[in-house]
Image (cartoon, grey):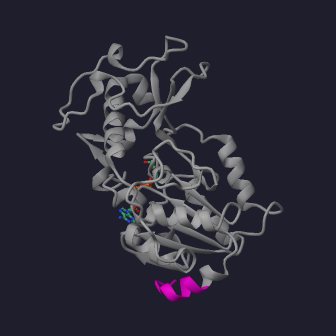
Amino acid sequence: MSSDLDSFHEYLRKSKRILAVCGAGLGASSGLPTFRGAGGMWRQHNAMELATPEAFRNHPGLVWQFYSLRRHYALQAKPNAAHYALAELARRRPNPQFLTLSQNVDGLSNTAGHPGKSIEYMHGSLFRVRCMRSWCRYERDDVMDPITPALKVDEGDVERTVGTDELPRCPECKTGLLRPAVIWFGENLDPQTLKRINQYLSRPYQDPVDLCIVIGTSGTVFPTAGYAGKVKEMGGKVAVVDIDCSVRPEQAKDENFADWLFEGDAAELVPKMLYPIIGDLQIPETPPGNVNSKCCD
Ligand code: APR
């Protein structure tokens, strides 16, 4: 295992197919909290306990306050250099040469202009809502902040009760509440997303992926956490970027899991790592996209 940038650059130059697996650490430098660790708490709630269908059924007002706050801050956040570096790599190495898997729902990769055909949003988006009734197919892009007046984020973020009559309701079936179109714990990922990823990774569709770059994720949520291991099994190499590499579960299991460990802020490290392909990164004055933009290639 190495933290030698030159050896990584040498391998990157030879890599024909690359996969990036990204988590909340990618957005940390844009001011968005991560889930595990200090950022994982909201008021006295563990954020992950609110990200479940049960929590929404039992406490829709509380869950919507949590998501309204996340929407509010994500709309104010700006992509950082790591988002732009990955978007530039995707422009220079279009799918199937490069694919990003993002667990993030903050829309920042879209805002950075990441080509839509070269990124899979594993857990949906804060800026899409859908009816909570499984039989009702209504959904829409939605960047209203707040989505209803009762969900306005007050800076003090004081705990208050929001009744279901103050929450967004499905305009189609008129019975269900609208919910964030994100994947909650206990829910399945979109089968079409999984199918595309498996095709990206599996022979005979493609040559094997040479390099998987794991950026700012604790590697605790599957199936996303398993893709780096798949690349490894097929003879590829793995590079991990994390502010604290010691926390990684697979490191605990297998010291040699990662071929490179780069410890530090993704916003600083990722542009340096990708330099041989993307060159000097130009950060635009104004982000080229928005949280829901689907930049075509
Ligand atoms: N640069 C790089 N890595 C960072 C930075 C940073 N600036 N800041 C934090 N990290 C690292 C942390 O050390 C941690 O390993 O990012 C990782 C974030 O891990 P989590 O908070 O667990 O977030 P993530 O891995 O994205 O969680 C996966 O779990 O809560 C669910 O659906 C949610 O998509 C999320 C999924």
Of the 4 image quadrants, the one containing the C terminus is bottom right
* 143 left or right of 117 in image: left
Q: Which residues are magenta?
A: 1-10
Asked if 131 appears above or below 237 in the picture, the reply is above
Residue 139 visible? The answer is: yes
- At x 54%, y 12%, the residue is 173
Rendered position, 140 above or below 222: above
Image location (x, y in percent) of residue 198: 71, 54
The total of numbered circles placed on residues is 0
* Main SS, magenta residues: helix
Residue 25: percent from the left, percent from the top?
40, 60
Residue 225: horizontal and vertical position, in percent? 55, 58
Seen as rendered, the residue at the extreme right is: 204
Residue at screen point 83% across, 62% down = 204
Residue at point 56%, 64% (across, down) = 20
* Rendered position, 114 above or below 157: below
Does 181 appear above or below 227? above
Residue that extends furthest to the top in the rendered view of this protein: 174
Q: Is residue 250 left or right of residue 285?
A: right
- Is 4 magenta? The answer is yes
Residue under the image location 80 percent in, 63 percent down: 203
User: Does residue 11 appear left or right of residue 170 in this picture?
Assistant: right
